[in-house]
Image (tube, grey):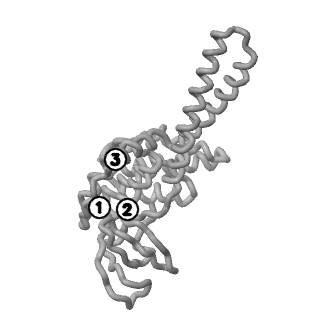
Amino acid sequence: MGRIANKIVFLILLANCLYAGESSDILFLFEKGNEAYLNEDYKESVNRYESIIAKGYESGTLYFNLGNAYYKSGNIGQAILNYERALKWLPNDENVTVNLKIANLGVKDRIDTPPEFFLFRWYKKFVNLFSSRGWAIWVTLSAIVAALSFTLSWNLDLRKLRFLVRFIMYASIVVFLVALPEMVQRYRIETNHDYGIIIDYSVKSLAAPQGSSTELFIVHEGTKVNILDQDRDWYKIELIDGKQGWIPAGSVGII
């Protein structure tokens, strides 16, 4: 399932820490989680990584490592859930993608998805070239370059140099107009909580949000579902094939 991520990569997660002591505590837990994983103590590794998340910290590397630990401990549902979460942070990471595919082989409910139109597939790959922060950098830099170029273009006497500056300005505007919607789209993907993974071994999907309601179908651990609605402690879900029903909220982990 791939090697455990290097602790140096995890330092990115600590960029938002406000206190050095707190940063050291998080890094200590991460190192202990890595150590437990390498020693094949997967339960302890899970506990260490989960304790970091409980403190409010997230990263693609953390979710990826947690997914690996859950997979090694035989918990397919939680493994898939955390690989899916890692994919939000690391959409182009080959290790995350491969491990998610391997974990999905263990899902009992194998629902075939219709092939995606190639233009949509290409657009999705383009959007996933960068995170929302990455696209935001492109938006900011292109806006700055365009503004500077516009200012310079009206204060240059040499015609040839003015042409070059205006070309840079127009190119920057194009980059800005392309990057801005991609930044918005990536942000929506990263903050979208409309999908979840079944984490219980099997769950009865009912016709209404109450235990005495009619059973419609059964979903199993690791199945990805679209969450349509919530009623108290119940989620209304939809499968890829269009089936809908209500399940207890505790039986699904939100991506």
Image location (x, y in percent) of residue 166: 63, 21
From mark 1 to mark 2, how far is it between C-alphas? 9 Å
Can residue 20 be seen here? The reply is: yes
On-image quarter of the C terminus: bottom left
Residue positioned 57% across, 57% down in the render: 56
Within 10 Å of the Cα at label 1, are there few (<14), some (14-19), or many (20+) other Cα atoms? Answer: few
Question: Which label belongs to residue 78?
Answer: 2
Q: Amino acid at mark 2?
A: Gln
From mark 2 to mark 3, how far is it between C-alphas? 16 Å
Mark 1 secondary-structure assignment: loop
Please tell me which of labels 3 and 1 falls first in the chain: 1
How many marks overall? 3
Image location (x, y in percent) of residue 143: 64, 33
Q: Nearer the viewer, residue 184 or 3?
A: 184
**Residue ID for mark 3:** 97
Question: Which label belongs to residue 74?
Answer: 1
Image location (x, y in percent) of residue 81: 39, 60
